[in-house]
Amino acid sequence: MEEPRLKKLYKEEVIPKLMEKFKYKNKLQVPKILKIVLNMGIGRDGKDAKAVEAAQRELTLIAGQKAVLTKAKKSIAGFNVRKGNIVGVMVTLRGNRMYEFLDRLITVALPRIRDFEGLPKSSVDGRGSYTIGIKEHVIFPEVDYNTIYKVQGMNVTIVTSAKTPEETIALLKEIGLPIREG
């Protein structure tokens, strides 16, 4: 099996650029992408078996890996949620699947967003993760618009080994994620 395009790009171009920019002495100090977590909340449709099954099927199509159901850890009366209720579906991607998904996200899905001007710098947390909120999951070409149950939003969290927000942003920009300035 051939190595994914983004993985090759990371090894050949991103590592040397980041070593120069941040003055790393060793290749192993350069931050890398550890995993990508896709999460789709179901909300009020948690009791609707059709909606749950549709969300799981669509997220599985997008990720190329079976999505698992997430359940509430505790009851929250204000949200009408009981412990054990299904509240969403999620997938964790690692290795080659992760790079393939990121490549599809950058080259195919993000350009399909209406009025897209780049991703915000502020979506990074202090621990090396970058989260993208997507309003409509139909931007992915794997999802057939005619067979979807309901247009839903989803979160894509890219977890890196970066120690600072600056390292996270630099890594993701070098890989090709369209993060806007300012």
Image (cartoon, rainbow, N blue to C red):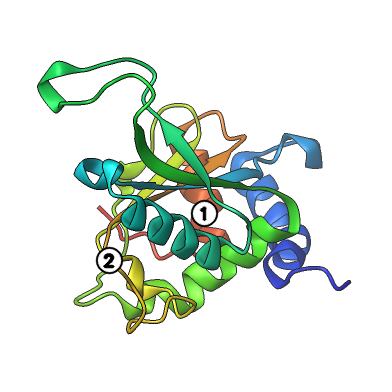
Tell me if 141 is positioned left or right of 12 in this view: left
Q: Residue at x 50, y 34 (%)?
A: 128
Q: Residue at x 47, y 79 (%)?
A: 108
Q: Residues within 10 Å of mark 2 (few under 14, many from 20)?
A: few
Q: Residue at x 20, y 42 (%)?
A: 44
Q: Secondary structure at mark 1?
A: helix
Comparing 61 with 172, the one in front is 61
Circle nearer the N terminus (1, 2): 2
Q: Which residue is mark 1?
A: 172
* Quadrant housing the N terminus: bottom right
Residue 127 numbered mark, or none: none
Q: Position of residue 46 (x, y in %)?
A: 29, 42
Q: Position of residue 136 (x, y in %)?
A: 27, 66
* The quarter of the displayed image where residue 109 is located: bottom left
Compared to residue 88, the image places residue 181 above or below, namely: below
Q: Could you tell me the amino acid type at mark 1? A: Leu
* The quarter of the displayed image where residue 5 is located: bottom right
Q: Secondary structure at mark 2?
A: loop
Compared to residue 102, the image places residue 2 above or below, namely: below
Q: Residues within 10 Å of mark 1 (few under 14, many from 20)?
A: some
Q: Which tag is nearer the camera, tag 1 or tag 2?
A: 2
Q: Could you tell me the amino acid type at mark 2? A: Glu
Compared to residue 120, the image places residue 149 above or below, namely: below
Which residue sits furthest bottom?
146
Which residue sits furthest right?
1
Q: Which residue is mark 2?
A: 136
Comparing 90 with 155, the one in front is 90
Q: Residue at x 66, y 61 (%)?
A: 99
Q: Position of residue 78 (x, y in %)?
A: 10, 21
